[in-house]
Amino acid sequence: MTAQPDTTDNIGHIARVFVDARRDGGLVPEFPGTVPVTLDEGYAVQDAALRLVNGKIAGWKVGRINPPLEGIDRLTGPIFADQVVTADADSVAMPVFAKGFAAAEAEFLLRIGVVPDPAKSRYTIDEARAMVDAVHVGIEIASSPFPGINDLGATVTVSDFGNNNGLVVGADADGWRTGDINDWPVELWINGALIGAATSTTMLDGPFGAVRYLLEHLAARGIALSPGQWVSTGAVTGVHPVAIGDRVEARFDRRFAVTCTIKAR
C-alpha cells in the first residue's frame, strides 16, 4: 500500500510554496501538493500561510462559488495593506504575476466602521449593513503565481489567499445610504473596449450580503474584523483576464469611474 502524505505536512508545504512565490514573484507551474478536498482544508492552508507572513491585513475579498460547494456559495481571502492603492486623477499601476493568473474585477468596496461583537456568530443583512460606514467603487486585482488557480475549484482558490493581489479604491459611492446600489449599472472596460456589464442584483444577496457572509465566516475562524478594513464584495461583471500593459476602467452608475493599468509583478 502506498503511504499517504501527512495532512499537516501537506498543508504546511502548500502554504510555504505559495508564500515564497508571492514574496519572490515566482511561478508555481503545478499545484504544490495534494489538492484540498474540502473548503475547511483550503482555509487550513490559508491560515497556515497567514502565519508565515507579516503583512498587515487591510481587508478581505469575497468571491462567488458557482455552483456552491458543500452548500457554501462564497469564499474569502485576505487583502494586504501594501497592496491597497487609492485611485486619484491618474491611473495607478497594479502588479500581477505575468506568467501566472491575472484578472480584474469591478467591485463595490465596503468599509467596516465598528468592531463586531466577538460573541456574535450570525447576522442579518440589516445588521451587516449597520457595520458599514462607507461604500466606494473599486477594482480588485486577482492574481496568483499558479496559472491554474481557478481551474481546480474553490478549495484551491482559497488556499492561495483567495486569488487576491491588490485593491484599487475609487471614489465614495455617493447615494449608497439612501439608494439601492444593487440597481446601479456597472461596466468593466479594458483598453477602451466594453468587456462586461451587469448590476449587483445578479450577485446572490448583493454587496451587503457579502459583508454578512464575511462576518459569519471570520467569526467561525476566530478572526476579528477591525474598523477601517475593506470588504471587496465580489465581481459585479465577472472575472476578466488581463495582460501586462492593459488599461482597466470600471464604471458605476454612469457617475463614477476608477482606472488602473496592469504591470508585471
Image (tube, rainbow, N blue to C red):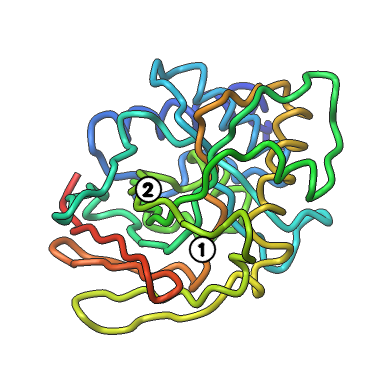
x and y percentages locating residue 203 in the rendered image: 65, 68
Element on which disc 2 rests: strand
Say which quarter of the image contains residue 240.
bottom left
User: Mark 2 or mark 1: which is in front?
Assistant: 1
Please name the residue shown 51% across and 63% down the image: 235
Give me the disc on residue 144.
2
Vertical position of residue 18 compared to residue 171: above or below: above
Q: Quarter of the image containing the C terminus?
A: top left
Please name the residue shown 28% across and 41% down the image: 85
Frontmost residue, 230 versus 164: 230
Q: Quarter of the image containing the N terminus?
A: top right
Q: Amino acid at mark 1?
A: Ala
Frontmost residue, 157 versus 263: 263
In the image, is 99 to the left or to the right of 197? left
Vertical position of residue 1 compared to residue 92: above or below: above
Sooner in the amino-acid sequence: mark 2 or mark 1:
2
x and y percentages locating residue 234 in the rendered image: 55, 58
Mark 2 crowd level (few <14, some 14–19, many ≥20, 10 Å Cα): many
In the image, is 198 to the left or to the right of 252? right
Give me the disc on residue 235.
1
Element on which disc 1 rests: loop
x and y percentages locating residue 194 in the rendered image: 32, 84
Q: CA distance from mark 2 to mark 1?
A: 17 Å
x and y percentages locating residue 73 in the rendered image: 73, 58
Q: How many numbered discs sit on the rendered protein?
A: 2
Please name the residue shown 41% across and 34% down the image: 18
Give me the disc on residue 166.
none
Q: Amino acid at mark 2?
A: Ser
Mark 1 crowd level (few <14, some 14–19, many ≥20, 10 Å Cα): many
Q: Are marks 2 and 1 in contact (CB under 8 Å)?
A: no
Please name the residue shown 72% across and 36% down the image: 215
